[in-house]
């Protein structure tokens, strides 16, 4: 299975011309953060979840880079008595050795750094998926714990603490710990002045920190739930296309907005099945008073001027295009609309 990695998505543009102290620190910090989110050792002992995590991220990245292993798995040497001694490195040791090896100039500094940031990206994505899976099971786990608590109470046995409360507290702690790691990673990106931002499993370029804080970060948090998967996916596609000079990034931003409108229409049981396009779904929201008249008009105008020209062949007319400034506006405008619509549900 193909794994989407930062180094491949961002082969261009070149971000680092030389390997300086700032990226060196960033790679060390990224490696430490991976150990924070999923340590290989817990209380000095190998942790099964940690072993699986490090094996998986090693194998996923090695395959994408066309390598059998990131660094040698086995070590061996002859001692002074000419005896052969050998052993095996753990996956976390193999990852750390590769991640922190000195830059020797055999490949470009840009590729060297991007490949190693890809390990950070994969690791954070894997752990985020793990946390999301536990979040999805939370309600069932609480119900099971509450039944356990009730059985003890009926038997009159002393209970030191409600198990259900423990399940809730553990889940809150798990999510808070991961969010702290995400916040620190993004803080490290800012500190290294590399204009990168991690969100919902991906590292992408974010040049304007004000936009990141006021628009992008709240947006990514809102669309992290599984039901917004298509919204999240198309917006990431829009950003990747914008940053790498691909075709029609604004179209994907508008698709993300359109998916949001359709999801809300469906959840509110407004969809009739007779809709022929985005306009009809916008009318559904308007009819249910989820948006005002001016919002309806603004949304339709956006689809008329941005989404539709790129969603249909121009025929003999000139190929539609947007300037870089207009493309950024289209993406940011779509994010703002999506946030507003989700919060207004």
Image: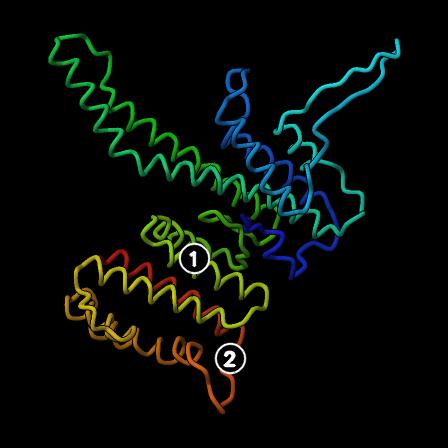
Say few, some or many: other residues with alpha carbon within 10 Å of mark 2 (under 14 / 14 to 19 / 20 or more): some
Q: Residue at x 62, y 47 (%)?
A: 64
Question: In front of the other: label 2 or label 1?
Answer: 1
Q: Which mark is residue 321?
A: 2
Horizontal relation, residue 66 to residue 296: left or right: right
Q: CA distance from mark 2 to mark 1?
A: 22 Å
Say few, some or many: other residues with alpha carbon within 10 Å of mark 1 (under 14 / 14 to 19 / 20 or more): some
Q: Residue at x 18, y 59 (%)?
A: 268
- Helix, strand, or loop for circle 1? helix
For residue 285, above or below residue 191: below
Q: Which mark is residue 233?
A: 1
Quarter of the image with the C terminus is bottom left
**Camera-nearest residue between 223 and 16:** 223
For residue 316, above or below residue 270: below
Please provide percent x and percent y for residue 32.
Answer: 58, 32
Q: Residue at x 12, y 9 (%)?
A: 155
């Amino acid at each position: 299975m193909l794994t989407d990695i930062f180094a491949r998505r961002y082969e261009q543009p070149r971000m680092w011309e030389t390997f300086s102290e700032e990226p060196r620190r960033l790679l060390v910090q990224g490696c430490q953060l991976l150990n924070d989110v999923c340590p290989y050792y817990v209380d000095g002992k190998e942790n099964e979840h940690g072993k699986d995590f490090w094996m998986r991220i090693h194998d996923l990245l090695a395959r994408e880079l066309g390598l059998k292993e990131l660094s040698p798995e086995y070590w061996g040497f002859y001692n002074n008595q000419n005896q052969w001694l050998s052993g095996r490195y753990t996956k976390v040791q193999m990852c750390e050795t590769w991640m922190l090896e000195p830059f020797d100039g055999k490949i470009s500094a840009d590729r060297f750094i991007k490949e190693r940031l890809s390990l950070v990206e994969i690791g954070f994505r894997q752990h985020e998926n793990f946390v999301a899976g536990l979040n999805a099971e939370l309600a069932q786990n609480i119900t099971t714990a509450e039944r356990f608590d009730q059985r003890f109470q009926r038997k009159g046995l002393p209970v030191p603490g409600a198990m259900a409360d423990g399940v809730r507290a553990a889940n809150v702690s798990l999510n808070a710990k991961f969010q702290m790691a995400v916040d620190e990673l993004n803080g490290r990106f800012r500190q290294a002045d590399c204009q990168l931002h991690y969100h919902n499993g991906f590292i992408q370029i974010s040049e304007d920190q004000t936009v990141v804080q006021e628009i992008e970060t709240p947006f990514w948090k809102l669309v992290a739930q599984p039901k917004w998967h298509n919204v999240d996916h198309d917006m990431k596609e829009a950003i990747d296309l914008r940053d790498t000079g691909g075709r029609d990034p604004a179209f994907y931003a508008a698709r993300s907005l359109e998916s949001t409108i359709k999801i809300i229409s469906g959840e509110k049981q407004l969809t009739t099945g007779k809709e022929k396009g985005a306009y009809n779904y916008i009318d559904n929201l308007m009819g249910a008073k989820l948006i005002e008249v001016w919002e309806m008009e603004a949304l339709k105008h956006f689809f008329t001027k941005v989404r539709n020209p790129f969603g249909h062949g121009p025929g003999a007319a000139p190929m539609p295009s947007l300037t870089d400034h207009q493309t950024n506006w289209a993406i940011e405008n779509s994010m703002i609309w999506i946030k507003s619509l989700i919060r207004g549900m």
